[in-house]
Amino acid sequence: MSTKLFADSSCDLPLAFFKEHGVELISLQVHIDDKEFKDLITIQPETVYNEIRAGKMPKTSQATPQFIENLFIELAESGESGIYIALSSELSGTYQTAVMMCEQVKEKYPNLDLTIIDSRCVSVGYGMAVMTAVDLIKKGKPKDVIVEIVKEQCQHIEHLFTVEDLDFLAKGGRLSRSSAFIGGLLNIKPLLHVEDGKLVPLEKIRGKKKLLKRMLDVMEERGVDLENQLIGISHGDDEATALEVKQIIEERFGAKKFYINLIGSVVASHAGPGTLAVFFLNKKPSMEEV
């Protein structure tokens, strides 16, 4: 029996990826003015960036519980097993809603075979876990093996990123206002990471050149076998800087495999234009090559 994979749009993989690999999309919602949009369905990231530059402050929300419940009912009725890899529960309530809906569906369909994974990841870091699951499903791996490997990978995906304006993260409740104030006041660029699923300031550095160098220094300190692993890079509508960082990583670490993508509508609504993030593993997969 095949395994059905679910992921939400904050993994920052394009709609074409979901369609090509049969991944069920749980579209999170973006609100601009009084209008509501479904991420990747009725709004694209470029629109969000343009609205932000025009002075708008988009807000985001989960998919509705009813939508998630209906997807899980369809899974139960199909008889397939399923895995939902969710955005970090520290950044969204989507994981908790999915767990609640799973338990609710099980009351009517006790044979529902669904595992929900709290990735503790975001953006392409989360997307890399989804890509791993897709690859394992295509290889015909059993569900329990896929779950074990994905969970392990999620525990070891490093997120290093910087934003142009910390106020976006502060206003969206993803970072304390005091951290944002200090960064803006001194015109210092922040280096942040994800720690146990939360966005945490790591250092504050003056100047883009020094910031990028420090980002790669941390990458060298934490990364393992960077030459042979997939390196993820996501950017807030600044492909030129993303490609510059890719080239530096290639030259410094000999890395050969990259996945580069635009940061999607939901994450962009909180991080803003000019965000840059790098994702990599700090430990070799122990069970098999992923």
Image (cartoon, helix red, strand yellow):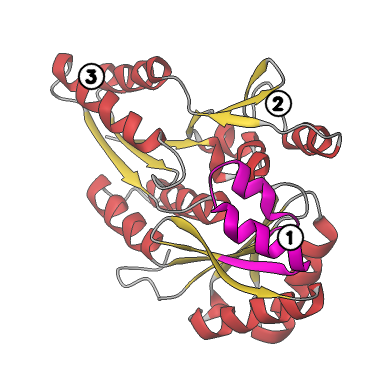
The residue that mark 3 highlights is 105
* Residue 179 among those drawn in magenta: yes
Question: What is the CA distance from the residue labelled 2 to the residue labelled 3?
Answer: 30 Å
- Residue 205 screen position, x and y as percent: 70, 76
- Report whether 210 appears left or right of 253: right
**213 or 262, which is in the foreground?**
213
**152 or 204, which is in the foreground?**
204
Q: What is the quadrant of the N terminus in the image?
A: top left
The residue that mark 2 highlights is 43
Magenta residues, as a range? 163-192
- Residue 161 screen position, x and y as percent: 63, 63
- The crowd level at tag 3 (other Cα within 10 Å; few <14, some 14-19, many 20+) is some
Which residue is drawn at the image coordinates 51% and 51% (left, top)?
122
- Report whether 132 appears left or right of 265: left
Which residue is drawn at the image coordinates 80% and 75% (left, top)?
207
Any part of residue 229 in sight = yes
Asked if residue 141 is positioned above or below residue 23 in the image, the reply reads below
Q: Dot 3: what SS?
A: helix
The residue type indicated by label 2 comes to: Ile
**Which of disc 2 and disc 1 is earlier in sequence?**
2
The residue that mark 1 highlights is 184
Asked if residue 196 is positioned above or below residue 17 in the image, the reply reads below
Is disc 1 in contact with disc 3, using a CB cutoff of under 8 Å?
A: no
The residue type indicated by label 1 comes to: Gly
Question: What is the CA distance from the residue labelled 1 to the residue labelled 3?
Answer: 47 Å
* Residue 189 among those drawn in magenta: yes
- The crowd level at tag 2 (other Cα within 10 Å; few <14, some 14-19, many 20+) is some
